[in-house]
Image (cartoon, grey):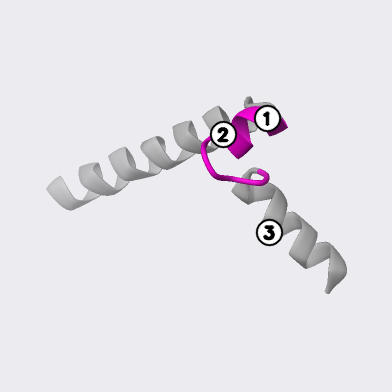
């Protein structure tokens, strides 16, 4: 049961982080060292394949 709770908590934190990055402007992303949100990279890679 503890493992399931830990996995759920980690999943929630991951989703919260992705949502927070999605709300940032390109300038804010550059300020923290990212050129664009990670979820956009994966969708661009799959679109070119």
Chain-order first, disc 1 or disc 3: 1
Q: Look at mark 3 in the image and give the residue it sits on.
A: 42
Q: Look at mark 2 in the image and give the residue it sits on.
A: 31
Report, in whole angstroms, how far the alpha carbon at label 1 lies from the one at label 3.
20 Å
Tell me the number on the disc at residue 27.
1
Specify the quadrant of the image occupied by residue 12: top left
Q: Pointer 1: residues within 10 angstroms few (<14), some, or many (20+)?
A: few
Q: Which residue is drawn at 54% across and 38% down?
A: 18
User: Is residue 45 or residue 8 the one in the foreground?
Assistant: 45
Q: Relative to 20, does residue 48 appear above or below in the rendering?
A: below
In the rendered structure, the answer to whether residue 37 lies left or right of residue 49 reads: left
Q: Pointer 3: residues within 10 angstroms few (<14), some, or many (20+)?
A: few
Q: Closer to the camera: disc 2 or disc 3?
A: 2
Q: Are marks 1 and 3 in contact (CB under 8 Å)?
A: no
Q: Do the residues labelled 1 and 2 touch (CB within 8 Å)?
A: yes
Decide if residue 1 is in sight here.
no
Percent x, y of residue 28: 61, 28
Q: Residue at x 63, y 25 (%)?
A: 23
User: Is residue 32 or residue 14 the one in the foreground?
Assistant: 32
Question: SS for tag 1?
Answer: helix
Q: Does the magenta stretch include residue 30?
A: yes
Q: In the image, which residues are magenta?
A: 26-36
Question: SS for tag 3?
Answer: helix
Percent x, y of residue 17: 47, 35
In the rendered structure, the answer to whether residue 16 lies left or right of residue 29 reads: left
Q: Does the magenta stretch include residue 33?
A: yes
Of the 4 image quadrants, the one containing the C terminus is bottom right
Decide if residue 4 is in sight here.
yes
Specify the quadrant of the image occupied by residue 33: top right
User: Is residue 38 or residue 47 the one in the foreground?
Assistant: 38
């Amino acid at each position: 049961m503890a493992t399931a709770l830990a996995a759920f908590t980690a999943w929630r934190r991951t989703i919260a982080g992705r949502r927070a990055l999605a709300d940032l402007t390109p300038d804010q992303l550059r300020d923290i060292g990212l050129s664009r949100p990670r979820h956009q990279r994966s969708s661009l890679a799959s679109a070119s394949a």
